[in-house]
Image (cartoon, helix red, strand yellow):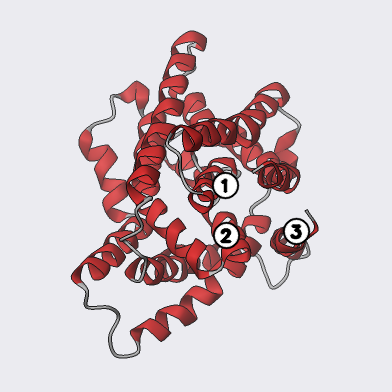
Amino acid sequence: MIALLLALWPLFALIVAGYLLRRAGFPNEAFWPGAERLNYFVLFPALLLSNLASAPLDNPALPRLALAVVLGLGLLWLALLLARRLFAWPAARFGAIAQGILRFNTYLGLATLGSLYGPDGLALAALMLALMIPIVNAMSVWALLAEHGASARSLLLPMLKNPLILACLAGAAINLSGLGLPGGSERLLALLAAASLPLGLLCVGAALQPRQLHGEVPALGWNCALRLLAVPALAYGVARLLALPAMESTVLVLFFALPTAPTAYVLTRQLGGDSQLMAGIITLQTLLAALSLPLVLVLL
């Protein structure tokens, strides 16, 4: 337990630092949107590409891990569709609720796995993300456009423009080709990747909006309870069902236990969803994850 807390507290300290720095106006308000864009379009794709390019594709547990991801996300999606029909949520509300259940804070997940398992954990997580990111993005866009009849084009276009998906595809292609990263490019990507997770966690803190927590208290409460406790319990059940090894089980459960992604707010606002509810969900889940993540990992 002590070792786990020692691994996790620096990550949440960076989130708190990001929140305090932005509220103090340091360095200035224009810095944070630029930092988010730099991380999203350059640094974080470099991290995914470099890890996928060297990831061990001969891991015998990978097919079962991929099946576990698809099965877990599929069960969550079916439950969300049933709930939408039962409660007659409009697309604006359903999109925010669905993203609160489905999406995950990739920065926090990779930083946690890096602290717990080092490069082996990061490589395994990158392989899983190559599958999870496109599926979750497609579900999120469909949820927000459900009332407007989401077309194949409206689902595929955001994915084709997504730098994280493109980085996953490029990393997988390099890995499968056997060419590796030539001419010092591996070192370049490693330098870019090293800046990604600390900056990402600072940006997560800077994006928190505590003022959005006063409204929709019941919806915020049950959404957080489902995402942070029930969803990882489901992932654990799937891992046991498929007899995943210990590290693969931890990676799966961890990514299903993470708070939702801060980028969900941007997507919700762009597609006309309930951005106030989404901001509240992001903020409360991130704050509560400081308690729930150690609990989930200790139970594992």
Q: Secondary structure at mark 3?
A: helix
- Is residue 166 in view? yes
- Is residue 30 in view? no
- In percent of width and height, residue 233 lies at 59, 32
Q: What label sits on residue 16 in the rendered view?
A: 3
- In percent of width and height, residue 209 lies at 69, 46
Q: Secondary structure at mark 2?
A: helix
Q: Earlier in the sequence, mark 3 or mark 1?
A: 3
- In percent of width and height, residue 216 lies at 68, 25
Residue at 47% across, 30% down: 95
Q: What label sits on residue 113 in the rendered view?
A: 2
Q: CA distance from mark 2 to mark 1?
A: 9 Å
CB atoms at circles 2 and 3 under 8 Å apart? no
The answer to which image quadrant residue 50 occupies is bottom left
Q: Secondary structure at mark 1?
A: helix
Q: CA distance from mark 2 to mark 3?
A: 20 Å
For the residues carrying marks 2 and 3, which lies nearer the camera in this image?
2
The answer to which image quadrant residue 46 occupies is bottom left
Q: Mark 1 = which residue?
A: 254
Residue at 78% across, 64% down: 24
